[in-house]
Image (cartoon, coloured by chain):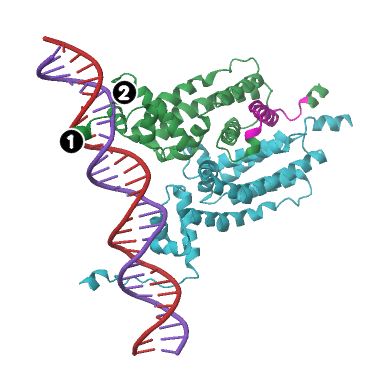
Chain colours: A green, B cyan, C red, D purple
Amino acid sequence: MTEAALSLDHAKFRRQPEVRPGQILDAAVKVFTDRGIAAAKLEEIATLAGVSKGTIYLYFHSKEELFREVVRQKVVPLLALADEGVTAESATAALRASLEHHWTYMDRDDAEGWVRLALLELHKFPDLAQFYRDEVVNRSNAVLFGIIERGIAAGEFRPIDADAAVMMIKGILLTHVIWCGAHSPNPAMRAKPRDQILHDITDFVLHALRPVTPVAATVFE
Amino acid sequence: MTEAALSLDHAKFRRQPEVRPGQILDAAVKVFTDRGIAAAKLEEIATLAGVSKGTIYLYFHSKEELFREVVRQKVVPLLALADEGVTAESATAALRASLEHHWTYMDRDDAEGWVRLALLELHKFPDLAQFYRDEVVNRSNAVLFGIIERGIAAGEFRPIDADAAVMMIKGILLTHVIWCGAHSPNPAMRAKPRDQILHDITDFVLHALRPVTPVAATVFE
DNA sequence: CCTATTACTGACTGAACGTTCAGTAACCTA
DNA sequence: TAGGTTACTGAACGTTCAGTCAGTAATAGG
């Protein structure tokens, strides 16, 4: 009786310790970005990964440690690409390329979720926030900063506090990722083609940075 | 024995049904903005309001209904002021005034919490999100939209998709509220004086909107 | 003063969920 | 193929928390 009651229903589970961590991390990415850190259920992650809840604890100490590992292995590597596009000859071209790059790499199903996590919940994990800031945010900001400084020096952009400009650009980008995402409550934004949005952003930013009297300068020369 | 065990410890509670809802709402604002919707505990709201958990249910059906009422009574009235500054003679002055107004009314302890809620958590409660959108977001956006259209018509601003421009401006404002708030992981932003930030934002936005060849136009006339 | 009514309390309930662990299946070695 | 080891399972546990309710204190009316 006991044996019958306890016997598993011949579920086809395999022992594959090499791939389990990866499967769990993939599932965790999806669930964390869908639900947020606090609302993510280990049961759901386990089901999605095709394992049982207990298996997660064979590879990760806790839910928080699992999240930490997700950031380390799934987010940071993406951002290693943040330096692309800087080699363009003019600062304007570099900025265009960088904006397009940011927008493109954020054009993923889970981008909206990541932005929400980063802005909303990450501050509740101070060490993770610091780690994320060092590895992801600062690196990406430095690229934009360099482009803007270069543009100012070359006379392509007007004199402006480059740090402040970076924050403006980041603010526009991040909010638009959310507003254009699947969970956006704004139907008008969701309906707009993504390249139209990128065009609008690029247009706005370049106009904000352009010298005050480029034509006049030409006229007066 | 039973009587002794059950008797209250002479806590000095008073019956004041008129003020209870207000006290509870005030406490709820604080806790909701501090913790977020899901993580807010009714017990904490009750303690902060100086009542017991049960009392909340005398005045509100549920946690969600309580949150709805917080939005209705604490947020919407603030936004009734969103139309100020529009009466300025020029669109530029109106936009300056509107930005300053937005920035000022967001310069509150709970502003950061509200932005986080609205931008990042509200979408999990679809009907609440819709309510918030109708009552708060659309109303505020319409004001900015009107100013920009007016500026374009008057030749103060370059031709631009006014809807898109509104989203850029909102994106900058909202992210800066978060980044300058108490929970910001960005020390540099937190250190900056608030009026400096407002100045940077206004400068960036006005330059993004100004006509392409204002000086040239003058020169050529 | 006594009684009815209203305001309020806080222990309790039930559900959800992170974490544990006794037990079972798959695999390995000899 | 027996015996040992490792991977895995899922029921059970402990905690947290929204929501309930039987009981108690304040107040109003007679």
Task: Reply yes or no: does residue A191 show up in magenta.
Answer: yes
Q: Amino acid at mark 2?
A: Lys
Residue B108: percent from left, percent from top: 54, 51
Position of B146 compared to C20: left or right? right
Residue A149 is at least partly visible in this image: no
Question: Is B104 rendered above or below residue A104?
Answer: below
> Which residue: 66% across, 21% down?
A92
Residue A21: percent from left, percent from top: 34, 24
Residue B59: percent from left, percent from top: 47, 64
Q: Amino acid at mark 1?
A: Met
- What secondary structure is found at the residue carrying circle 2? loop
The residue segment tinted magenta is: A190-214
Residue B127 is at least partly visible in this image: yes
Quadrant where the C terminus of chain A is found in the figure: top right
Q: Residues within 10 Å of mark 2 (few under 14, many from 20)?
A: few
Question: Is the residue at mark 2 from the same chain as the one at mark 1?
Answer: yes
Q: Main secondary structure of the magenta part?
A: helix
Quadrant where the N terminus of chain A is found in the figure: top left
Residue A101: percent from left, percent from top: 58, 22
User: How far is mark 2 from mark 1, CA to CA?
Assistant: 23 Å
Do the residues bearing badges 2 and 1 touch, measured as CB atoms within 8 Å?
A: no
Pick whichever, B15 or B50, lies toward us.
B15
Question: Is B98 rendered above or below residue A138?
Answer: below
Residue to which mark 1 is pinned: A1
> Which residue: 77% across, 41% down?
B149
Residue to which mark 2 is pinned: A12
